[in-house]
Image (spheres, rainbow, N blue to C red):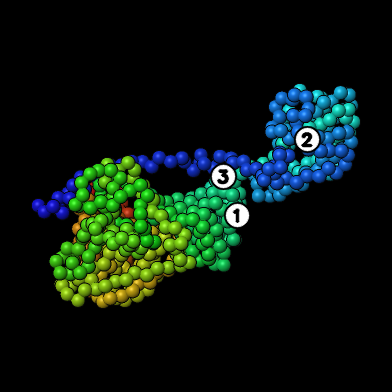
Amino acid sequence: MNYKHAFMLLLASLLGHSPLMAQSWSDLVNNNKQNIIVRQTFQNEVTDNWNYTIAKGEGEVIDTNTLPSIEGNHGKKAIKLLANSELKFDHFDRTPFDSTFIHVHTYAQLKQREDTVFVRMYKTTENELVALLKVSTSKFWGTNISQAPGFDIVTHKLQNYFLMDTALAYGCNRLYTLFTGKGNWSDATHWSHKAARRNQKALISGALTVDQDAHCVSAEVDNGSLQIAKGKSLRCNTLTLHDKSGGSSSFINEGTLDLTQQLVVEKTFEQKGKWYFFSLPFDVYDVEGFTLKDDTEKGAGNYFYLQTYDSQQRATSGKGWKVVKTTDIPEGQPLIRKHQGYLIALDNSASKTTLRFIATAAMLNEEFGRGGTLTIQASNSGSDANKGWTLCGNPLPSPLHLSEIEGKEALDGYVYVYNAGRYQAYSLNSNYAIAPYSAFFVKANEDATLAAAPHTKEVATGQLLSSEAVVLPSDPQLLPTSNAQVSAAESVQILPEKNAVRIEQLPEAGTAQWLRANGQIVQTVSVAAGSSVLPYPTGSAGIYLLRLSYGEKSRVVKCRIY
């Protein structure tokens, strides 16, 4: 056994799982954050941005050290008001916040029974006065005024004086707001705490369309999709796309994405020690917290491994997989190249199974999420069975619809995805789509450039393709005609798979009947034209017949259900 194969078998035995430890989104959306909107401490600080005026009577900022000892004061300055005075604070904008409150820190000596300090809060009418202090305080005292856009202090009968050393206005927002369901950014009913604003973080677990110019701190998509509509924009510091199960998040850009910091793809792998078909829609120069390792290095830890597919090597030797060595990557070049297909595996001793792939805003161009290209080089040498194989990555951060690929005339008419223990062919004219962040094979007859643009139509259940993990990767092979059940007179394909039968290129709607080997009908279902997936009937294992009828034609295929 050669050293490279020993390395492959070693990785094949590395099994394990480390759950992602993170605070759940349901916990995050219940957290409040208080922001100081305006403040005044009378200390002549740069942060004292709440303007005020003495509208009536006498008032001045004094040094509290000049007064008899008073407990609880903040700082050494306070504003002092005498009787029949008014202190007015400017109003502030409350609309960006879920709620607001004003905190004042005051002191007063009230000697007469009639002595009272009032506050005008502007909640209903400008003349509304509410008693702030009715009795003397032995120390500075804090009071909160809720939901007021500003306030005035009014002293009427006052034998002594009134002091204030702090006035703070707070805006309260949920730091996170969660979008669920299907709808637009402007539709408040889909958000847990209104549509995300510039001081909030958006969590997206549904199908969200940005239908207006939007601005938030950050946006995260998990088990959902984010689409920017034409003519609209989304501005945020960071966009994070979580992928936990083959295409669980996607992004389509028909407008403008204005990132100020970075784009992150967080990819979670179910197991360590297995190879996953993988790709990214942007170049990556470093993987946060992980190091690339190859078959010449020893040690254990937070390492990952990569394999690429060498089309020329496959054409000449029949084998195409190559382990990526750290010495193969020139300094300054990407560790992982965009749109290229890879196999990726995590070391068994890795402390986590989620990798963060990051691209800075400067690394992305305005076309990100709009489309991408794949370069295919077909070898002129080698047998027909071995030449022309290329491992491609999905160039989009969204499903790649096979029927929308341009330039596919140079291909043999299929993409090849590893499922149910073997490579399976899917027609380029079908309704199937490749999941984002995954990889697939094509077989080309000549050099070609494939172009892909995102499509907003939804992918039907069972038609989003993502290769399953493998222990020891094999090379793709041409699908024998007998396995594909292809008639010489027509293009309809009936393809038995692990848990279902896949039907391709059905020219018109029809019916399918499941029969036992003795002819007993078990189930009859309708079948749509084009591509569809028929689950095996529930019941005992054994030999079943599938009779597909459409128009005046009928086909029968034998299936073994385990």
Above or below 95: residue 34: above
Badge 1 element: loop
In the foreground, 195 or 287: 287
Badge 2 element: strand
The numbered mark, 2 or 1, whose residue comes first in the sequence reads 2
Q: Position of residue 60 (x, y in %)?
A: 81, 38
CA–CA distance in space, label 3 to label 2? 38 Å
User: Amino acid type of disc 1?
Assistant: Asp
- The picture quadrant where one finds residue 102 is top right
The answer to whether mark 3 and mark 2 are in CB contact below 8 A is no
Look at discs 3 and 2 and give the one toward the viewer: 2
Measuring 82% from the left and 40% from the top, which residue is drawn there? 87
Q: Position of residue 480 (x, y in %)?
A: 19, 66
Above or below 339: residue 354: above
Q: Is residue 37 left or right of residue 107?
A: left
User: Amino acid type of disc 2?
Assistant: Ile
Q: Position of residue 405 (x, y in %)?
A: 37, 70
* Residue 298 in view (yes/no): yes
Provide the residue designation for mark 1. 187
